Amino acid sequence: MDNTTTQLGLMMAKNRFYFLEAGTSRPLRLLSAGALDLDVPFDFQSLADRELLSHFSGAISEMIDRFAISASAVSFCLDRRMVQLKRLKIDREFSEAEVRQQVEWELEQMLVSPRSEYHANYERVRSERDHYDHVIIAVVRKAIITYLNDIFKNTRVRLDLVDVDLLAAIRGLLLLKPQSRGLAALIDVQEELLGITLIKDQGYLTYGELKYQSSELGEENSEELATRINDEILRLMESLGDELLLKSIEEIHISAASLPTAVVHALQRLQRAAQIQILEPLSQIDHSLSMEAEQMIRENARYILPLLGLLRA
């Protein structure tokens, strides 16, 4: 296949690469998917070691060859811990020049090192219901982007775009649920950790984490875990002050089927106004994947949403 007709999304999580390859035409069609183990994790400690560049480059090249990837460019998803996010409320009448000026002022307040050491980007989210807009600022150290560029310089794919998993996951959700509106919660089911993102009118609001023990996934503990999830959702809503006053969650999306049905049902009893759904990308996205690729997606569902968001971007 011509490498200009395919696109590649890639992320590193713990000691593994995950990727999706899709066509560039719309609607999106997945062509291949896979994962590859790494000897060392891609984390802050690795970023300080230039000798690991060849290891990561070699692993990407191995992945390209093993899965016969034809794309010439890649979109890469960074772990949320490598990126600072901030959300601002702004006057909806602000010009783009005024928004940029406000963003730069906020950056001067939030950064612990000189502004010159960071890449910053922002997205303006226009609200249909409120009298103001929001701006989502994403900030990453230039050293991280330089390290990524150096990794891909030694492969045959070009680094084209860098995103953060939290925001990419929202874009992935909107690919699956384009009609989603109002106030929603996205629950990212991880190993002994639940990440909860609040979304309003398709825009990022805030994020929180809830640790749990694997023993809590038993049916006898379902009510307790559901109560803790609900309490964290309410805490996140309260943290936004008057913005969500008298509001209720309308949709709850769960990224993986590994959250037991008993917990989902218990959460539904606590969030009666919300429609709760476990996301199933394979049933909602056109694809020509092998059985092996389908199985990888089912077993690693939480990584698929941000990868879909990269392809949507």
Image: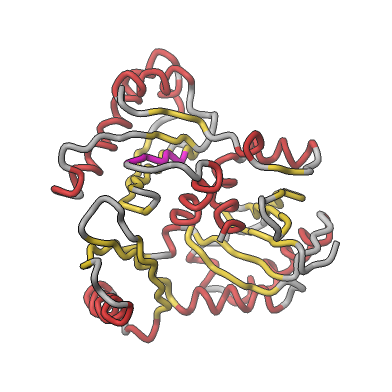
Q: Can you tell which quarter of the image residue 274 is in?
A: top left
* Start-end of magenta stretch: 183-188
Query: Image height check: is 258 above or below 184?
Result: above
Query: Image height check: is 313 above or below 199?
Result: below
Q: Identify the residue at horizontal 39%, vertical 13% (top origin).
A: 220
Q: Identify the residue at horizontal 44%, vertical 36% (top origin).
A: 253
198 relative position to 3: left or right: left
Q: Identify the residue at horizontal 65%, vertical 55% (top origin).
A: 17
* Most foreground residue, 230 or 124: 124
- Whether 208 is among the magenta residues is no
Picture coordinates of residue 96, whole percent (x, y): 33, 77
Query: Image height check: is 229 above or below 38?
Result: above
* Most foreground residue, 3 or 177: 177
Is there any visible trace of residue 112 in the rendered image? no
Picture coordinates of residue 210, whole percent (x, y): 34, 39
Picture coordinates of residue 92, whole percent (x, y): 25, 66
Picture coordinates of residue 230, whole percent (x, y): 29, 30
Quarter of the rendering occupied by the N terminus: bottom right
Q: Can you tell which quarter of the image residue 19 is in?
A: bottom right
Query: Image height check: is 259 above or below 69?
Result: above
- Whether 185 is among the magenta residues is yes
